[in-house]
Image (spheres, helix red, strand yellow):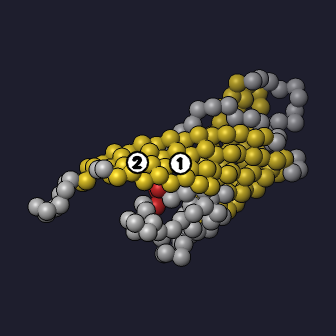
Amino acid sequence: SGNWFLGATPNLKKHYLGLRILNQNFESRHNALFENEEVLESTERLSSANIWMQFAVKEKWTFQIIIPYTYSIQSENESETKITGLGDISALVNYSVLSNESKMLSDWKYNIQIGLGAKAPTGIFEPNDITGLLQPNMQPGSGAWDLLAVYNAVLRYKLVGFSQQLGYQARGTNKMDY
C-alpha cells in the first residue's frame, strides 16, 4: 500500500512541529451466502491526525516523534461503531548522509537522510464485547512493537523544493497473534 501527501516540508535538519491529517473511506457489499442471511453493506471512514515533531540533536542527527490520534466509524446495515483514541506512537533517529545545507552560497540545497526507529503499542487494540474483534484497521493501535526504517530526501531551490520519503515497517505480532 502507499500514500502520497502534498504540503510544506520544513528543512529536515531543524526542529519542527507539524500536523498531518489522513482520511480514508471504504465501501463494501457482501452478498448473502445462504437464504436466511442478509446482504451486508459496510461503510468505513478512517481518520487520523498525526502530530510530527523533530528535534535537531547534532549537525547530522535528528530525533523524530509521531503521535497519532484516530477517529473511525464503521456503518454496517443499521448499526454504527465509533472508535477514537491515541494510536501507536513512533520514534525515529535520522542521520544525514549527504547534504549541502551548511553551504550558504548555493541557491540549490539538498539533504538525504536515513533513519531507524520503532513504533510502540501505545494505542488500544482489544476485542469489542458486542461484536467480537473489531476489524484491525478500526483499532487505534496494533498492540505490537514494529521496527521502522526510513529514507528522506529534499531538493530545494531557494524557497521551493521537492521532498521524497520512503519507509519500511517490519510488523510485530500482538498478544492475539495478529
Q: Where does label 2 land, which residue? A: 44
Q: Is residue 83 rendered to the left or right of residue 115?
A: left
Amino acid of disc 1: Tyr
Residue 165, given in percent of the width and then of the height, sits at 62, 44
Question: Would you say 156 lies left or right of 144 here?
Answer: right
**What residue is shown at x 82% (from left), y 47% (from top)?**
55
Q: Is residue 159 above or below residue 142?
A: above
In the displayed structure, 100 sits above or below 106; it is: below
Element type at mark 1:
strand
In the rendered image, residue 176, in percent from the top left (x then y), is placed at 49, 75
Residue 70: in sight, yes or no? yes
Q: CA distance from mark 2 to mark 1?
A: 11 Å
Instruction: Check disc 2: other Cα within 10 Å, few if <14, some if 14-19, many if 20+.
Output: many
Q: Secondary structure at mark 2?
A: strand
Q: Nearer the viewer, residue 65 or 60?
A: 65
Judge from the rendering whether residue 10 lies leftward or rightward of residue 173; answer left or right. Answer: right
Q: Is residue 2 above or below residue 120?
A: above
In front of the other: 10 or 50: 50
Q: Residue 105 at what x, y percent from top left? A: 87, 26
| Amino acid marked by disc 2 | Glu
Tell me the quarter of the picture where residue 17 sits.
Answer: top right
First in sequence, mark 2 or 1: give its number.
2
Q: What residue does disc 1 label? A: 71
**Picture coordinates of residue 32, whole percent (x, y):** 18, 58
Please name the residue shown 72% across and 29% down the image.
156
Crowding around mark 1 (Cα neighbors within 10 Å: few <14, some 14 to 19, many 20+) is some
| 111, above or below 114, in the image | above
Q: What residue is at 57 percent from the left and 37 percent from the top?
A: 5
